[in-house]
Image (cartoon, rainbow, N blue to C red):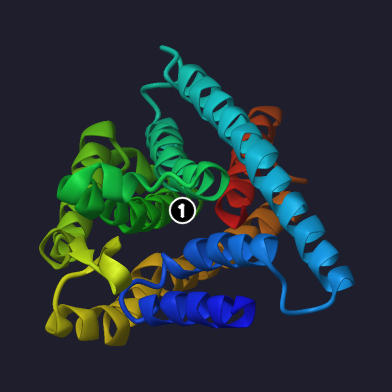
């Protein structure tokens, strides 16, 4: 009877993976732990090991995630406060960095908080919030991730222009153009991800459990056949190629400028040193 209960639990969760892959790890772990606690089909030693590792997992989720949320929130808020100072806010670079700080803060709370509540307290905010939250949370997860990547691309291109075309960059890289660029990127990515508002909804899964997943077969096929490739290009591949190309050229230019400073005046040397320092800081931001 106990073995049958475990098999039934595994079957119940396995069938859900075809409806919503984000539900499986949490439901499976939770239900399997309950099955082991009420009766193990394996040896007692194995049961104790399973309980031990489950306790470690629960401790990690209960302790590390609130810690990461706290550190990330404080760090991003402090970064935004510093970057919004009057002396810095007129720089286009600082405007991009401020936008990144706010986007990272939203992404942190949108993604990490949901996983923490689901793992540590078995609270599924997508279900509790109804269809609106079921649609909004996955939309923000994809939109914010892609937005951060392309803001980094804009920041890198702005630094590339400043290094290779310093005089033209002063005319091109202005705040009004940067604001327009950020708005255009946001509108385009909003349109690309807007299909989530159509396709995601709360449905009745196996054994009448409510799940937040793709609503119909046609959208389900699109989500698992085509959308992963689209997200891969927008979130990783295309930004990575641009960042790699621009940053490589910036590094070469910075090294070349360092060895060509012998015949420069002290004022030029100071300006180039300041530019090189700022460039290296932004390179680290892009890499991280």
Residue 112 pos. (x, y %): 50, 45
Q: Which residue is mark 1?
A: 156
**Is residue 185 something one can see in this rendering?**
no
> Residue visible at 32% across and 41% down?
173
The picture places residue 266, in percent across and down from the top left corner, at: 71, 29
Outermost residue to the left? 198
Query: For mark 1, does the 10 Å Cα neighbourhood hold few (<14), some (14 to 19), or many (20 or more) residues?
Result: many
Q: Position of residue 27 (x, y in %)?
A: 48, 63
Q: Taking 266 as reference, is 25 left or right?
A: left
Image: 45 above or below 161 = below
Camera-side residue of 183 and 120? 120
In the rendered image, residue 108, in percent from the top left (x then y), is placed at 47, 41
For the image, the number of numbered tags is 1
In what element is the residue under mark 1?
A: helix
Residue at the outermost right position: 45
Nearest the eye: 69 or 192: 69
Q: Quadrant of the N terminus?
A: bottom right
Q: At 36% across and 54% down in the image, what residue appears?
A: 141
Q: Quadrant of residue 99?
A: top left
Residue at the far front in the pictured view:
1
Q: Residue at x 62, y 76 (%)?
A: 2
Q: Note whether 288 is above or below 232 in the view shown.
A: above
Q: Is residue 283 visible?
A: yes
Which residue is painted at 77% across and 65% down in the image? 50
Q: Nearer the viewer, residue 24 or 209?
A: 209
């Amino acid at each position: 009877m106990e073995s049958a209960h475990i098999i039934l639990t595994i079957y119940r969760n396995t069938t859900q993976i075809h409806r919503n892959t984000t539900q499986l790890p949490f439901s499976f772990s939770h239900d399997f732990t309950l099955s082991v606690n009420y009766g193990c089909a394996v040896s007692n030693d194995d049961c104790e090991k399973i309980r031990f590792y489950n306790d470690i997992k629960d401790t990690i989720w209960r302790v590390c995630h609130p810690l990461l949320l706290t550190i990330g929130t404080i760090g991003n808020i402090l970064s935004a406060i510093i970057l919004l100072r009057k002396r810095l806010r007129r720089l286009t670079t600082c405007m991009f960095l401020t936008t990144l700080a706010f986007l990272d803060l939203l992404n942190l709370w949108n993604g990490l908080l949901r996983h923490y509540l689901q793992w540590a307290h078995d609270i599924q905010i997508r279900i509790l919030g109804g269809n609106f939250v079921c649609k909004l949370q996955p939309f923000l997860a994809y939109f914010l991730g892609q937005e951060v990547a392309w803001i980094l691309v804009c920041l890198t291109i702005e630094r590339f222009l400043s290094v290779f075309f310093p005089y033209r960059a002063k005319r091109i890289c202005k705040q009004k153009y940067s604001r327009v660029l950020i708005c255009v990127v946001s509108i385009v990515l909003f349109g690309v991800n807007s299909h989530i508002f159509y396709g995601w909804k709360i449905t009745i899964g196996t054994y009448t459990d409510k799940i937040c997943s793709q609503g119909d077969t046609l959208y389900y096929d699109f989500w698992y056949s085509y959308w992963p490739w689209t997200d891969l290009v927008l979130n990783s591949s295309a930004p990575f190629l641009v960042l790699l190309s621009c940053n490589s050229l910036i590094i070469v230019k910075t090294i070349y400028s360092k060895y060509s400073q012998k015949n420069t005046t002290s004022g030029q040397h100071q300006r180039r040193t300041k530019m090189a320092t700022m460039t290296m800081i932004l390179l680290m931001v892009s890499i991280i």
